[in-house]
Image: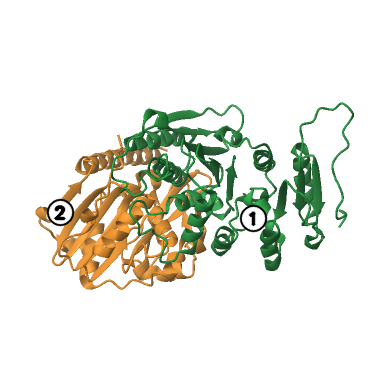
Amino acid sequence: MSMSAGRNNAPTRPRGFSDAAAGRALLMERDPACARDIARVLRTVVGTTDVRDNFSAIEWQGKWDVAVINYDQLSQSEKDRVFTRFSELNASGGLLLFAAQTEREELVTLFGRHKARKLLARNGPVHAEDLLVTVQKTLRKDIFGLDKYLGWGAHARRLSVTSSSDKEHVLAGCQSLADAIGLSARKTELLLTVADELTTNALYDAPVDALSRARHAGLPRSERVELAPTEEIAVTFASDGRRIGISVEDPFGSLRPETVVDYLAKCFRRGTDQIDRKEGGAGLGLFYAFNSLSHFVANIEPRKRTELIGLIEIAGSFREFEQRAKSFNVFVEE
Amino acid sequence: MNSSKLSVATTALDAGTLVRVEGTIDESTEIQTLLPAGAEVVIYDLDGVKRITSYGVLQWVKALKELRARYYGFMRCRPCIVRQFNMVAGFGKQGEVLSVYLPYFCEGCDAEFENLLDLRADFVIAQTASPPEVRCPTCSAVAEFDDVPKSFLAFSSDYPKPHPPELAVRLISEALRTAAPRMRSLSPPMRSSLPSPAIPVPISTRNIATFTNPDSRSLSLPPSATTMKSHGGSPESVDRLRKLQDDLDVTRDRLNKMIKDRKSKT
């Protein structure tokens, strides 16, 4: 292995060079070629990038703003140790795991036991744009917007939702975009599922009163709800030809990161508690959205707003879509 | 505006009921429409189900919990339904999965189509996660099974080989006999020991999928035995589909005649 532990790979910058790059990143990757590719991306946005190929050589006490780790290369004990040692970094959203394989059991552990907040799918070579966006959002705390995940120039369509009856317009809009770009029938069905679940979540689960008590969560979803004009939900959908995405943003900011991962873990476990017995929804909405997507993003500004973004890869067959690992990111803007 | 509202049609046969479900199962789904009163045997024909939401799953599971039938099963389950069997524990409760559509994709034509798998006869295909080779109905090239076989057919470990009672078999035959207008076979049917051959169904026309079942001809029901509980004017949409199918048949016949004429001239 050519890389040496502890080597500082930050490039020397010329005097007077204006550079906003700051922060310190750790990269744990055993494949030299991959390490080179990922480090190249990291160095464009992070001041210092330390590359490690040996798990035991990591300085756990090091002050990392972001740690990028190839999860597939770790042994079971190493996987556990990552979360123990990086518990603070994980809680602050700085722990980013690459994974090519995410079996159901693994997801139960990742979400249930470890409360993992950031997974990046690795389907073939590392996707530079996704890595860049994820690291930038983590470091800069500029987290909102579907546009960050789509190529420049993608035309976004925006709908305002204040009533449960508006959901039909959202579904019709998604269907229309899917038809326009020639999205396959099965992927269109997934897109509609995501649009349905995220909009329902924003209408029934997100609204809270001044004391942060849920206003509609206990209602049957067949019961109509109306929001005040100032509480409108913004639904945006767009495609850049590579992906089709939907964003649903509510002005409540009531979703907690732990709620997202706990619900996912509960649903992946497939136990007797998989479907909620309580009044209101089935508690499956986020799980359905996750399963229907290539990339699921939750942006949360507590008590202010929540944005849930879903992205579906357009190219390739449904089989390829199902075979690929999924990305999952939760960002919190304090 | 929402053209995929759920419609449920029931057909009674002795102590059994065939329940045909079409559209999207969601928050507007009323549990009672899925529960035929007093039926001992219930067959759910899910051929027309387009989508199911998480709240729809809740409604569905509640309905099955209230169902008092001594036997029930699910036939012609679309991939969106198969996904539920795989994702949600107890989605089918004690019911049997009788037949599912296998999704295929032809890369050359960039087209999706589905093929019916009768689990009564070909359960081993599901058990071994080995979907049969199928040719594209348009170009005849070998199509790709458009899902991950092991995960798509994973439900077979929770739902064993179905053994429907005689009345259920008659209801299944009735469902196949009265399915919306029949399409001609566009390609050789897949390898199967099915009593009724499965015909590839292009996605765009999947709601008018048809099957042949010689046994079902012996069945005759009074028209009044079929009832439609509609949430969105489904009888009209069925009529439209029938008309569309008739038009398609006429066009196909014309094309065949033109091809024949051209051949005879050359």
| Chain of the residue where label 1 is placed in the rendered structure | A
Residue in the foreground of this view, choosing between B186 and B117 = B117
Q: Position of residue A68 (x, y in %)?
A: 71, 50
Name the residue located 47 percent from the left edge and 28 percent from the top edge: A157
What is chain A's hue in the picture? green
Amino acid beneath label 1: Ala
- Label 1: state its secondary structure: loop
- Marks 1, 2: nearer the viewer: 1
Give the residue at mark 2: B226
Q: Is residue A179 visible?
A: yes
Give the residue at mark 1: A100
Q: To which quarter of the image does residue A213 belong?
A: top left
Image quadrant containing the N terminus of chain A: bottom right
Q: Which chain is orange?
A: B
| Chain of the residue where label 2 is placed in the rendered structure | B
Name the residue located 69 percent from the left edge and 68 percent from the top edge: A77
Q: Position of residue B84 (x, y in %)?
A: 40, 58
Q: To which quarter of the image does residue A211 belong?
A: top left
A16, above or below A265, in the image: above
A134, above or below B96, in the image: above
Amino acid beneath label 2: Thr
Q: Are marks 1 and 2 in contact (CB under 8 Å)?
A: no
Residue ranking furthest to the front: A211
Name the residue located 53 percent from the left edge and 27 percent from the top edge: A155
Real-space CA distance between mark 1 and mark 2, rounded to the nearest whole angstrom: 51 Å
Residue in the foreground of this view, choosing between A226 and B117 = A226
B68, above or below B265, in the image: below
Q: Is residue B141 visible?
A: no
Q: How is the image coloured?
A: by chain
Q: Position of residue B143 (x, y in %)?
A: 50, 53
